[in-house]
Amino acid sequence: MKNVKKILITGGAGFIGSHLCERLLKEGNEVICLDNFFTGSKDNITHLMGNPYFEVIRHDIEEPISIEVDEIYNLASPASPIHYQKDPVKTVRTNVMGAINVLDIAKRTGAKVLQASTSEVYGDPEVHPQVEEYRGNVNPIGVRACYDEGKRCAETLFFDYYREYGVDIRVVRIFNTYGPRMAMNDGRVVSNFIIQALKNRNITIYGDGSQTRSFCYVSDLVDGLIKMMNSNLTGPINLGNPEEFTILELAKKVVKFTNSKSRIIFKPLPQDDPKQRKPHITKAKIYLNWKPKIGLEEGLVRTIEYFKNKLRNKL
Ligand code: NAD
Ligand code: UDP
């Protein structure tokens, strides 16, 4: 008989976390979803509630918790700029105390622990595309620092627990990921543009739209997270789709695929907004045999379908 693994997913009721819960349950594991529901939602996981191998714990990862598991995916942290900047001190605490708390569980139980780090550790990058060796260009006193430095400190803690206590760590740096179950009020660019387009409202580009991002569809990202957990690498490893687009190109694609009457308008660029971002994914390709399968157009069509249904059901 297959040995059933017990897996803890912090932030499991969020956008990426809920997809990960679903996948790991499908693969025959026991999944414990821990969340404080700050940006996550029960709607994302209600379809899993009847599964006897699924359990939900309402808990803030800032506080220690005692739990016996084989693997931990640490995803608890707001990820959208509007949410992580709402209470920046809390964002730092979630990332730093959260890392210490999951690492302490791993240290005590011998569990493997994976940290969902971010391309934001590279800040406004001067190296393009971003390789894992690049140490980044973060403004430590800017409005994005609570998230960027919180995640950087979490990486530091992971590597210190690895060196000092031999904890079995994995660190992945996730680049812009999108797809179904992003919250309606998430505020990140893909969901904002799709919702605006479906409502025929103005599409709000911040700045002149020449800044770039590289968008990864959520199922690809989840594949990468699981491959990383099952590897024997510590990382850090970039996970993202290396196809790069300007924000203006993204807006035009969304208008086209939604057949929208929306106009594109321009608003001020937020402080420290990175000008370019594209992952270098050679390491993931070689060591994890991973590369994204879903291009932006296909991913957008799927995501548009999700939001169409969401909006229809709200009426
Ligand atoms: P999300 O906001 O949908 O999910 C985050 C989840 O963490 C939510 O369910 C939220 O309620 C929970 N959470 C927040 N603070 C918590 C706390 N103190 N205790 C317990 N739970 C808490 O965002 P997401 O896009 O699913 O991101 C998941 C993880 O991946 C985050 O750590 C994020 O930093 C990382 N990441 C995401 C992206 C992306 O593009 N989506 C890119 C880089 C990194
Ligand atoms: N953006 C935009 N309009 C929006 C939301 C975001 O033009 O309604 C821009 C934002 O300024 C940034 C890019 O889109 O340049 C990606 O923003 P997001 O918040 O999705 O993620 P980031 O990569 O900045 O963390």
Image (spheres, rainbow, N blue to C red):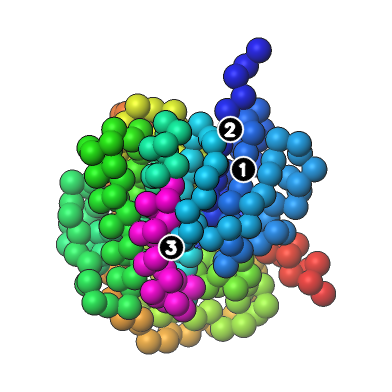
Asked whether, in this view, residue 177 is left or right of residue 100, the answer is right
Is the residue at mark 3 in contact range of ligand 1, meaning its CB lies under 8 Å from it? yes
The kind of residue tagged 2 is: Lys
Q: Marks 1 and 3: in contact by CB < 8 Å?
A: no
* Percent coordinates x, y for residue 157 in the rendering: 29, 50
Quadrant position of the N terminus in the picture: top right
For the residues labelled 1 and 2, the Cα–Cα distance comes to: 7 Å
- Residue at (42, 51) in percent of width and height: 101
- Find residue 212 and report its image quarter: bottom left
Magenta stretch holds residue 97: yes
- Find residue 282 and report its image quarter: top left
Report how many numbered discs are placed on residues in the image: 3
The residue stretch that appears in magenta: 83-102
The kind of residue tagged 1 is: Ile
For the residues labelled 3 and 1, the Cα–Cα distance comes to: 19 Å
Give the farthest residue toward the top. Answer: 1
* Percent coordinates x, y for residue 270 in the rendering: 35, 81
Tell me which numbered mark, 2 or 3, is placed earlier along the sequence: 2
* Percent coordinates x, y for residue 226 in the rendering: 48, 35
Magenta stretch holds residue 216: no
- Residue at (38, 74) in percent of width and height: 89
**Mark 1, secondary structure of its residue:** strand
